[in-house]
Amino acid sequence: MFPARVLASAPLALVILALSGCSSHWGCTDTTAERGEAGVRVQVEDTSGRPLGITAEVVDWRLEPHPQVPSEGDQVHFHYRFDGADEMSGPAVDACAVDKERVALGCQTVYSSEAFGPDGDLTGDDWLAVEFPEQVAGVLLLPNDQSYDGRTCEQDIKDGGGPHPPEPAGMGDQL
């Protein structure tokens, strides 16, 4: 009689565990950072919104054909600088060509590790392909560090979770 009573109460125990939060999620939670204010010069921030002590800046930009694909017409060629970054494990930020209303026409992530220079003043250049280059009014950076995005709870329920950078900026986003 005792084993039957134990078996009969097993589903109730599972319900109690599930309701108490001890389900299959192991307490794993994901949080996504808020997208920071875009600018020509930004203080790079971690996924908690705290400054990393690094500044990213668009030094200049111009429209011109890319030397490897000149037949595709003008693209946005921009130069950027990271001040205070580490060459090996520094941050990455999204760079976006925008129109006069700050609507993104094209974006990509730029990495301080791909820049070069002495004493933490790392400079580099990159290209943004946009459909209508004549609409480009500037290039802005988003302050959110995109260099590391750990595993999510969905990918790894045991070791995943925690803060994640915001979704990368894309065409049509209001910055």
Image (cartoon, rainbow, N blue to C red):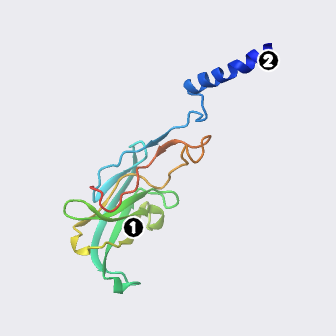
The x, y position of residue 117, in whole percent, is 43, 67
Q: Which residue is mark 2?
A: 3
Q: Residues within 10 Å of mark 1 (few under 14, many from 20)?
A: many
Along the horizontal axis of the image, is 53 left or right of 101? right
Vertical position of residue 124 compared to residue 40: above or below: below
The x, y position of residue 9, in whole percent, is 69, 18
Along the horizontal axis of the image, is 172 left or right of 17? left
Q: Residue at x 35, y 66 (%)?
A: 80
Q: In which image quadrant can residue 26 be found? A: top right
Nearest the eye: 77 or 2: 2
Q: Could you tell me the amino acid type at mark 1?
A: Thr
Vertical position of residue 39 compared to residue 47: above or below: below
The x, y position of residue 171, in whole percent, is 32, 62
> In whole angstroms, how far apart are the C-alphas of marks 2 and 1?
72 Å
Vertical position of residue 165 compared to residue 123: above or below: above
Nearest the eye: 57 or 100: 100
Nearest the eye: 75 or 27: 27
The x, y position of residue 18, in whole percent, is 58, 27
Mark earlier in primary sequence (2, 1) = 2
Point out the image quarter for the N terminus. Answer: top right
Point out the image quarter for the C terminus. Answer: bottom left
Q: Could you tell me the amino acid type at mark 2?
A: Pro
Q: Residues within 10 Å of mark 2 (few under 14, many from 20)?
A: few
Badge 2 vs badge 1, beta-carbon distance below 8 Å: no
Q: Secondary structure at mark 1?
A: strand
Q: Residue at x 35, y 86 (%)?
A: 71
Q: Residue at x 50, y 51 (%)?
A: 149
Q: Which mark is residue 123?
A: 1
